[in-house]
Image (cartoon, rainbow, N blue to C red):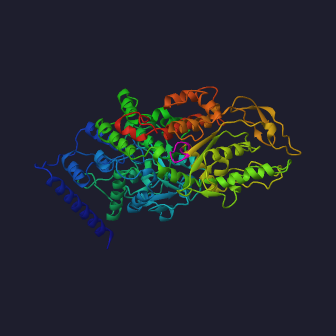
Amino acid sequence: MDMAHMAELNARLRREADSGMVDAARATKKERQPPLPLPSTASAEAMDEARAYEAPLAYAADEAAAKAHARSTEPRSPAKRQCLEPVAVCAGASSSVGAPADALGADGPDPRWDDAGFNEWADEAQLQFILLGYLRTLRKEEKILPAAQWIPRHAYHAGAPPSGVEIYNVIHVKGTKEHPDPWGDHLADLVEHLKDADDSDLVLMTFCARPQRHYTAAGDGSHTEFNSNGPCTDSRLRQTTESDGRPCWTDLTVEQERRLRAFEDGLKRTSWNVTYSGLRTVVLHRKPERPLPAEHRGRAIHESVWVTAELMLAAFCQRIVNSSDPEVKEHFSASALMNPVQRLREGYQSGKLRITIDSDLEGIIIPGLTRSLARMVPVRKDDSGFRAFCIQSRIGWIKVGFIRRFVSAHQRRAQDEVLLFPRRQELPRGSFYEGMPPENRRRFAVSHGWACENHPTPSSERIHRLALALKTAHADDDDAVFLDYASLFQNPRFGTRLGLPPQRDRTAGESKCFRTALFEMSRMFAFGGVKVIVLPQLERWQDFPAVLGSQNAPVPEFSEVKNRACEKSDLWGWINAVPYENRGWCAAEFSCALKAGIIANLEDPDVQRVLHARAWPQNVDEYQKMMDDPAIEFTDKGDSDFVAYLFFKMSFDLSAAQHGQPSGAHGP
């Protein structure tokens, strides 16, 4: 079959498909409305183009009938026609937040943990996950992103992604109407943000993930320049039209069109790209610093209603790679997320957030956002989320019997023998459960402050106290305990100066587990299926094991993090003498556990002292005030904001947002 005949066949199939959709749409109406002519005024055209730019993944409330009826009864620009079906929640973003009100419901599994649902969508749409190594090659060769259908087959994984790699979702402002990144700025930023990732890791970016209409030539990926007096002069990056001037409905093959429909249908049911926890999100917020005609200029990321709504969902559901960027950070502060519905409305009314079509805020964005939140189970009751967290992080749950045997061995040791509680990598086989303990075993989590930088309890005093607390709680030998040092994969802390075998480094897989655990760590102290044991006592460095030939006694040294002189030991690192209630992470854990009502040893005199040491927060505002207390100290300068965000995420009912109420209204 020659090319001319194929082109004619494709055109005939498009006309037949369009005709059938028009007839279906008109059959639902009592009166048929004749099609209107194409817009003849610049203002109508500009409005259509503006909305197309703002919502490049726009969705329709009703699929075939609504699309065909809209095409037959309303003037549309070429760009508007391209955006008629799928609806996005970001202005110029490459991913979508949800679907119209009648396409999302509160029923169904929590999308954050629905592996089967995400994989089904990826398979049905043959979603293209791009290899990071290919993107690095494009960057190195100064090429730009090709549309999905022109990416070489060796450069992407099609369908449900493999489990052994990281997967990154990309949210970005769109460079121009013709191309999301015509100069490669976003590509450069993406490669930089993922500089520590592996070439085999995958990237989900809508322009490269599903077939794009109106990209009829592959192009060589070279940079695109604009004519200052008009639109893009590169025909590879322009939308096409029919010979009669009517906007082209599609230039995709039948299979590509099917994949596109499956992609859009999945986003209508569930906003997978910003709700599935298996993805990590990168936010590309930099705007090109180039003089552009007004029709090509977009909004900054902080100005868009669509982007703000999408970032809200991603903040609730995913790990954000560059959440510390100032332009991104404001979207993930706890106060900004307390009431997402109110924030969108107030931002729009004040003019800080803008949107082209006013009715989209109440008609599309808020219903989609609140219905997505309604499916998210509060952390205190979220058994699926807790299970996913433990399995993905490969949590080591220490058996109570092992703790008791260690205490006995420590009591019997020779006076000069160094016996330290082991880290995760050195736990003996059979002494712990990996992932999740058996259902019939009780689970305990220990909240405590490390005695020093290199080990939580060099004297093992805390392990002795833990054994007593477990005895008081009537724990069985086969019950399970989470203790951070022995439950999470650790970096090496010591050489051979302790007279013990050297500690090996974390492997790449173990580092990935650690990062996953760190982001969700407060879940351990807010989930109702765990009892928290608080061990607030300080340890004296004088009780640490003395090692011949080492400088065991600490000396004063200035700490840049704490901005004051602190004691530091050559062997044990920084000595931590800050009370439990004034340690940032400890205060966060205690706040979460207290609010959830899961502290097992609350009546212990030392825990009672902590309870009455300050007014513990009941909402995010109170928590932020506590974090602003100069007495609260962290070991990392950036931890304060991150911990405030985790407190909100772990202690408050996100589904309360569906009623336009503060997210903490229903408690944990």
Residue 499 in picture, x, y percent from top left: 84, 52
The mark total stands at: 0
Q: Looking at this view, is 94 or 108 the one in front?
A: 108
Residue extending furthest toward the bottom: 1
Q: Measured along the vertical axis of the image, is residue 151 above or below residue 2?
A: above
Magenta stretch, residue numbers: 523-530
Please state the horizontal and vertical placement of residue 624, each as a whole percent of the image: 54, 29
Q: Residue at x 49, y 43 (%)?
A: 284
Q: Is residue 510 visible?
A: yes
In depth, the one of 184 and 306 nearer the eye is 306
Residue at (64, 33) in percent of width and height? 605
Instruction: Give left or right: position of 554 versus 365.
Output: right
Is residue 540 highlighted in magenta? no
Residue 90 vs residue 601, the one in the foreground: 601
Left/right placement of residue 417 relative to residue 436 reads right
Q: Main secondary structure of the magenta part?
A: loop
* Residue in the picture at 73% in, 50% down: 407
Farthest right residue in view = 549
Q: Point out residue 578 in the picture as x, y percentages from the top left corner.
A: 69, 32
The quadrant of the picture occupied by the N terminus is bottom left
User: Does 356 sit above or below residue 187?
Assistant: above
Tell me where residue 429 sits by quadrant.
bottom right
Residue 88, x across and y down, in percent? 36, 46
- Is residue 218 visible in the rendered structure shown here? no
In the picture, measured across the screen, residue 412 lies left or right of residue 100, that is right
